[in-house]
Amino acid sequence: MANKSFARILLAHGAGAGSDSEFMQQLANALNHHGVAPILFDFPYMVKAKALQKRRPPDRMPILLKAMTDQAAQLPSDLPLVLAGKSMGGRVATMLLDELGVPGIAYGYPFHPLGKPENLRVEHLQTINQPLLVLQGERDGFGKPEEVAGYSLPTNVEVCWLADGDHSFKPRKASGYSQLEHIEFAAKRSAQFIQEHLC
């Protein structure tokens, strides 16, 4: 952890890859570099999948919510807490913000399932009270700029777009950007957001 962390971030993984995935590790390292101490964990289904070395479907939402709530309850109170996650993990985090009274960050929020823009996952975002930062790639199939613009999100929900990024912030070579640059930008913006709302 950074020597002078000013906040702690509980960081949940997405549906397909656990806390040890390259994206999660790179993001955690970048956040740590900017003074935000990352705590990573695996949801119960991912723990089983790793033990069996076999892919498993995600747990149902009540189990995911309880797992993240339990993780948050175990953390020391010496630093302000932020809930965050990648994709599915971000969705879980956003559903707990008001209950736990903390800000949140979603990295690649799944506004709708792939190819199903009519199946929106934004109802709770439209009534959320806590500050929320969504960092989203412009080419994210789970929610693109022209779609998100029509969701009537409240002013405390900020969506920050990463140029030409996909669901994992990876841009095309021709864009002139790199995935690592976007992850670094996301971490830096996250630290700024946390400072704005905690300090």
Image: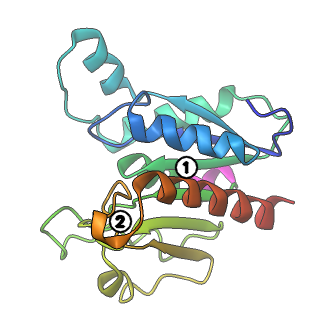
Q: Label 2 is placed on what type of residue?
A: Gly
Q: Number of labelled discs? A: 2
Q: Label 1 is placed on what type of residue?
A: Ala
The x, y position of residue 25, in whole percent, is 49, 34
Q: Quadrant of the C terminus?
A: bottom right
Residue 84's tag is 1
* Mark 2 crowdedness (10 Å alpha carbons): few <14, some 14-19, many ≥20: many
Q: CA distance from mark 2 to mark 1?
A: 19 Å
Q: What secondary structure is marked by label 2?
A: loop
Q: Main secondary structure of the magenta part?
A: helix
Q: Residue at x 46, y 38 (%)?
A: 24
Which residue in the structure is indicated by mark 2?
Answer: 165
Q: Is residue 121 above or below residue 46?
A: below
The x, y position of residue 80, in whole percent, is 79, 46
Q: Residue at x 70, y 55 (%)?
A: 101
Image quadrant in which you'd find residue 154: bottom right
Was residue 143 drawn as part of the magenta stretch in this picture? Answer: no
Whether the residues at callouts 2 and 1 have beta carbons within 8 Å, the answer is no
Q: Quadrant of the N terminus?
A: top right
Q: Residue furthest left?
A: 115
Was residue 97 drawn as part of the magenta stretch in this picture? Answer: yes
The residue segment tinted magenta is 96-101
The x, y position of residue 67, in whole percent, is 48, 31
User: Which residue occupies the foreground of this view, 13 or 152?
Assistant: 13
Instruction: Identify the image's colour scheme: rainbow, by chain, secondary structure or one colour.
Output: rainbow
Image quadrant in which you'd find residue 143: bottom left
Image quadrant in which you'd find residue 29: top right
Q: Is residue 148 visible?
A: yes
Q: What secondary structure is marked by label 1?
A: strand
Q: Is residue 174 above or below residue 37?
A: below
Q: Residue at x 18, y 76 (%)?
A: 118
